[in-house]
Amino acid sequence: MKIVVAVKQVPERDAVVRVGADGRSVDESDLAWTMNEPDAYALEEALQLKERAGEGEIVVLCAGPERVVSTLREALAKGADRAIHVVVPEEGEGSLGTRDALGVATLLADAARAEAADLVLTGLQSDDLGAGQTGVVMAELLGVPHATLVLAVELVDGGLRVKRELEDGWFQQVEMPLPALLTVQSGGNKLRYATLMGIKRAKLKETRAVEAGASGPRVDEVLKVAAPERVKRTEMLTGSADEIAAKIVAKLKMLR
Amino acid sequence: MSSVLVVMEQRGDGKWHRVSLEALAAGQKLAAELGVGCSVAVVGEAGGLVAELAALAGVDVWWVKHELLAKYSADGWVAALQQLVAEAKPGYVVFPHTYQVRDYAPALATRMGQVLISDVTAIGAGPVFTRQWMQGKLNAEYRHVGDGVCLVSVQAGSFQDRGQGPGPRVQKAGEVREFVPVIEVGQIRTRAGEPFREAAQTVDLSAAQVIVSVGRGIGEQENLAMVEELAAAMGAELAASRPICDAGWLPMERQVGSSGQTVAPKVYMAVGISGAIQHLVGMKGAKTVIAINKDEAAPIFEIADVGVVGDLFEIVPALTKALKAGA
């Protein structure tokens, strides 16, 4: 069984984000980057599927500038077999920012199609732009069935049975034939760390760079990016820890 | 005439999904600003909801019916709505940003060569659609480009449903038109089972008056004890944001947010929670929110009544000590 896992590299969660000079992007000059967490869960699901099956190949796929190689390497260190890097420029013509959700999904789908995988996995959304669409759009482009918000995957003859999350604590089983695409919800598995051995082995694994296709016009356009205006007046407490604690205790007495 | 079409979502128990009514409010607002009409689409089984909606909201309703739409499937919904859009020719389609919409609307958009502008929190003149980036740290304003239909989904809690059912008081009931799309059995590639719940929930956070909720800022599982102690000293229920439950540090039933419980306590103390929207929708109803977080740009401070920018590892023990001393 061949599994393609599409991952995204996003700014670290604690990153201080600033608006770019053009007023319509994120200033990337000072950011630390990491694997998008839902994609890490997608990778984990793939690793466990392969371990349970006792065979198979996991190809990790990422579109982005040179920096995303570190995220691909992390996936290889965790156990992916090889990597595909869809290379786009850091900025300007053809960069990720000039492509909309359909444009980015097209890059990933083109690379995945060439692999003719049985299963494509990705996270349900990204922690940066949060559109939550890439996986579903890829499925449509690849012409395969999909399920979203998946927490568990089981292989049944010729196909899949997945457990997907509904709202308010409900779940549902969905069955479909292969090939298929799943977007993975966080929390279905426990994430593994890369071992020292894994990190060593990763260096010997193949990372293939493929040139990204030209970007078409965007269907949507980002006009402006800004920090949200604070609507609520928050009373900020300051002082030493003990002083703050005393102030909170006084507040709590008033509130109850 | 670039009219607005709102795709409503009904639940299994014969009620509207709450966000559906908010999507209708958003769609009506957009239509009013553009000076165009607003109609509604309902897909599949909906019982008496359709007639009620037409009467109460005064909107024309497309009722999309087919035996293959008795149960939700992405393939069925995409096929049906693509045909409806071709028939009704709206300029804008507004969806509630529900799990179901996330499952099919991006594919529908792709089939039409479009992109869904998803999880929108505000609609301004233009129209310009605001959505969140970086887990709520930034707002980005989007515009649809080109001649095609513009697809938008709206975030829960962002648009006011007018309370007494959908829409304003109306003079005239809307018209209900049935639309039967062409769908073949072979087009539906997935087979969905009945929704189910896991083991019975034993923790009901919805009734709690005081909640101490912990997030990623706690760092390690060992540090949870500190927050548990604080909750005990406050006489509070302990809750958490999703990552804590994902990691297995607390059971899923203590999770507050879109995929967990919805709470409305008198006091909600958020410890090390940044305030991603998925969490905020579960606790927006709290009367007073007290937030402790080291990052002053954390979105939780946008809804907090009382905020502390600081190290929770110093403040939480100090607070527990002060509460115990005062008790």
Image: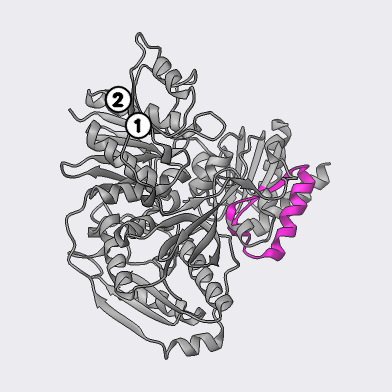
**Crowding near pointer 1: few (<14 within 10 Å), some, many (20+)?**
many
Q: Are marks 2 and 1 in contact (CB under 8 Å)?
A: yes
Three-letter code for the amino acid on which mark 2 is drawn: Cys
Numbered disc 2: secondary structure: strand
- Residue placed most toward the observer, B173 or B210: B173
Q: What subunit carries mark 2? A: B
**Residue B308 — which label?**
none
Q: Is residue A102 above or below residue B158?
A: below
Three-letter code for the amino acid on which mark 1 is drawn: Val
Q: Is residue B88 above or below residue A106?
A: above
The reply, left or right, for residue A247 in relation to residue A96 is: right
User: Quick one: label 2 or label 1, which is nearer the N terminus?
Assistant: 1
The reply, left or right, for residue B229 in relation to residue A154 is: right
Taking the magenta stretch, the answer to whether it contains residue B223 is yes
Q: Which residue is mark 1?
A: B6
Taking the magenta stretch, the answer to whether it contains residue A100 is no
Quadrant hosting residue B264: top right
The residue at the point 23 percent across, 43 percent down is: B144
Rendered location of residue B17, percent (x, y): 50, 33
Q: Which residue is mark 2?
A: B38
Rendered location of residue B56, percent (x, y): 43, 16
Instruction: Give, as a single range, the part of the protein colored magenta.
Output: B213-242
* Mark-to-mark CA distance, 2 and 1: 7 Å
Q: Is residue A205 visible?
A: yes
